[in-house]
Image (cartoon, rainbow, N blue to C red):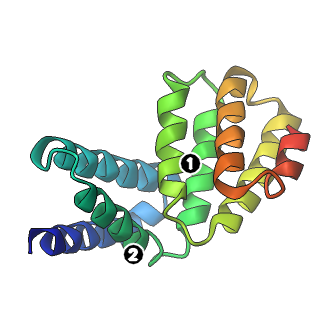
């Protein structure tokens, strides 16, 4: 069946990304590659499969499979967010945060991401390096509340 082949394609290509030793050395490039692959798969589903729910479900399951094969993924994603939120203002923060949360939903180690994110946020706040991206910080915290519950991100929200 074509859906099974689609799942295999996603898992195999995804594993090439998350098992790439060079990419693991650079959290920004690692996460950019995963995000770009997610965009590509989403476009395939929209254009070729007319937003068929079965393909969306297969895509989500396949992303969960390969993303969780690498135990550094949550850490890499938190580092990526830190790099993006430090410095210049982000163009289209809603889009970036939406893409990050989309990947976050595939993680089994969500608590690891939140822990790293909280530590890095604390450093951004202490060093005042998130001045240009407060809107993005609020957006990601609100989306994390929706995904994980208010109590899970309560301390992070209070800190912010």
The residue pinned by badge 1 equals 80
Q: How many marks?
A: 2
Q: From this view, report whether residue 118 is shown above or below residue 72.
A: above
Residue 134 visible in the picture:
yes
**Of residues 101 and 88, the one drawn nearer to the viewer in this rendering:** 101
Q: Position of residue 63 (x, y in %)?
A: 37, 65
The residue drawn where x is 53% and y is 58% is: 105
From the viewer's perspective, is 20 left or right of 101? left
- Residue 39's image quarter? top left
Circle on res. 144 = none
- Residue 143's image quarter? top right
The residue drawn where x is 55% and y is 38% is: 97
Quadrant of image for the C terminus: top right
The residue drawn where x is 46% and y is 65% is: 24
Circle on res. 65 = 2
Answer yes or no: do the residues labelled 1 and 2 have beta carbons within 8 Å? no
Q: From this view, report whether residue 8 is shown above or below residue 49.
A: below
């Amino acid at each position: 069946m074509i859906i099974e082949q689609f799942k295999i394609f996603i898992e195999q290509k995804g594993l090439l990304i998350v098992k790439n030793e060079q990419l693991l050395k650079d959290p920004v490039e690692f996460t950019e590659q995963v995000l770009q692959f997610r965009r590509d798969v989403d476009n395939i589903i929209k254009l070729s499969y007319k937003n068929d729910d079965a393909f969306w479900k297969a895509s989500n399951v396949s992303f969960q499979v390969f993303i969780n094969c690498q135990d550094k993924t949550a850490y890499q994603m938190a580092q990526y967010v830190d790099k993006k939120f430090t410095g210049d203002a982000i163009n289209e923060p809603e889009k970036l945060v939406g893409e990050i949360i989309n990947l976050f939903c595939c993680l089994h180690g969500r608590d690891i991401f939140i822990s790293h994110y909280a530590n890095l946020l604390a450093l951004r706040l202490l060093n005042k390096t998130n001045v240009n991206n407060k809107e993005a910080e609020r957006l990601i915290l609100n989306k994390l509340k929706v995904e994980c519950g208010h109590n899970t991100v309560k301390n992070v929200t209070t800190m912010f």
